[in-house]
């Protein structure tokens, strides 16, 4: 195992602007959804909505299961649950990578609902993708854990606070190696000490903790076991993974 690498302390904003996470989850779960429009560039049906509960309201994204495009390598009707599973892993890491996300019923049936995030428009995404930003490095580790098959640059949401969110996790958690990402700048490099500690906690929590129980509600048993094995492999090697020889390394388009 390679010795872990030290890095500067990271202090990202833990909350979306203006709404605490617990309130956001309650709002997304129990609020009244109203569809305002559709994000036409998305592959699957992705609806821009407002959600309101009492005096609290927010913008959100709603992806109904019935709007999911069939894929050859993922079971039909499972993408929304995978998005929620990514949020659960994000929560368990403590890195706050995925915005608050729930699975609930809506105007077009059950699906995932995620808090809308307003981004810092002045940031150059291509430059961010190629950077050594420690928050982006965290995302590279997170993607290796969830086996993200589609980490495009446009799936990074930088905030004015400096925090960086990641979205669009419908094609994750396959039991087969499908990691495809634009974040390969750390391939083969020792994992940061912080990442090693987080991965050790994830391993325990998937094997016998609340995260494992929650993931088994959202994914197949085979996929949960494969997630545990990916975490174990990262701990055993101590390095960021290399691209697979049997799978395209970078999604298209990359941004």
Image: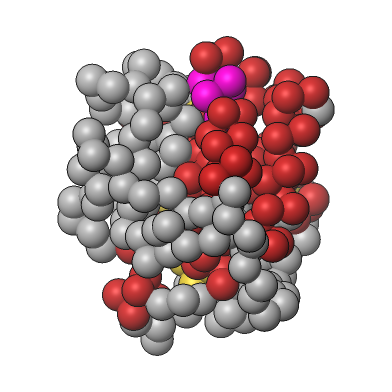
Residue 225 shown in magenta: yes
Residue 14 in view here: yes
The magenta-colored residue range is 223-227
Question: As drawn, is 46 to the left or to the right of 112?
Answer: left
In the depicted structure, whether residue 90 falls above or below residue 204: below
Task: Tell me if residue 222 is in the magenta stretch.
Answer: no
Q: From this viewpoint, which residue is outermost toward the top? A: 221
Q: Is residue 193 above or below residue 125?
A: above
Question: What percent of the width, then of the height, locates residue 48?
Answer: 43, 50
Give the residue at the far bottom of this rendering: 122
Q: In the visual, does 189 lie left or right of 28? A: left
Residue at 71% in and 40% down: 202
Viewer-side residue, 240 vs 67: 240
Q: Nearer the viewer, residue 19 or 211?
A: 211
> x%, y% of residue 147?
44, 38
Q: What residue is shown at x 81% (from left), y 27% (from top)?
A: 209
Note whether residue 37 is visible. Answer: no
Report the label total.
0
């Amino acid at each position: 195992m390679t010795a872990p690498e030290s890095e500067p302390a990271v202090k990202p904003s833990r909350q979306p602007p203006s709404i605490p996470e617990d309130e956001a989850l309650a709002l997304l779960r129990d609020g009244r959804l109203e569809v305002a429009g559709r994000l036409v560039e998305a592959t699957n049906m992705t609806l821009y909505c407002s959600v309101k509960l009492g005096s609290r309201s927010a913008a959100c994204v709603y992806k109904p299961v019935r709007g999911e495009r069939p894929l050859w390598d993922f079971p039909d009707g499972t993408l929304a649950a995978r998005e929620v599973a990514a949020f659960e892993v994000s929560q368990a890491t403590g890195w706050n990578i995925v915005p608050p996300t729930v699975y609930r019923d809506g105007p077009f049936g059950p699906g995932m609902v995620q808090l809308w995030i307003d981004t810092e428009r002045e940031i150059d995404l291509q430059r961010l993708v190629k950077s050594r930003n420690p928050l982006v490095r965290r995302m590279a580790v997170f993607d290796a854990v969830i086996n993200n098959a589609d980490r495009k640059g446009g799936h990074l949401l930088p905030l004015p606070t400096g925090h960086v969110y990641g979205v669009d996790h419908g094609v994750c958690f396959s039991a087969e190696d499908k990691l495809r990402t634009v974040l390969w700048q750390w391939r083969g490099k020792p994992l940061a000490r912080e990442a090693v500690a987080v991965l050790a906690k994830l391993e325990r929590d998937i094997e016998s903790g609340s995260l494992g129980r929650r993931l088994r509600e959202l994914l197949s048993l085979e996929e949960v076991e494969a997630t545990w094995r990916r975490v174990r492999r990262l701990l055993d090697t101590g390095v960021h993974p290399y691209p697979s020889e049997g799978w395209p390394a970078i999604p298209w388009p990359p941004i």
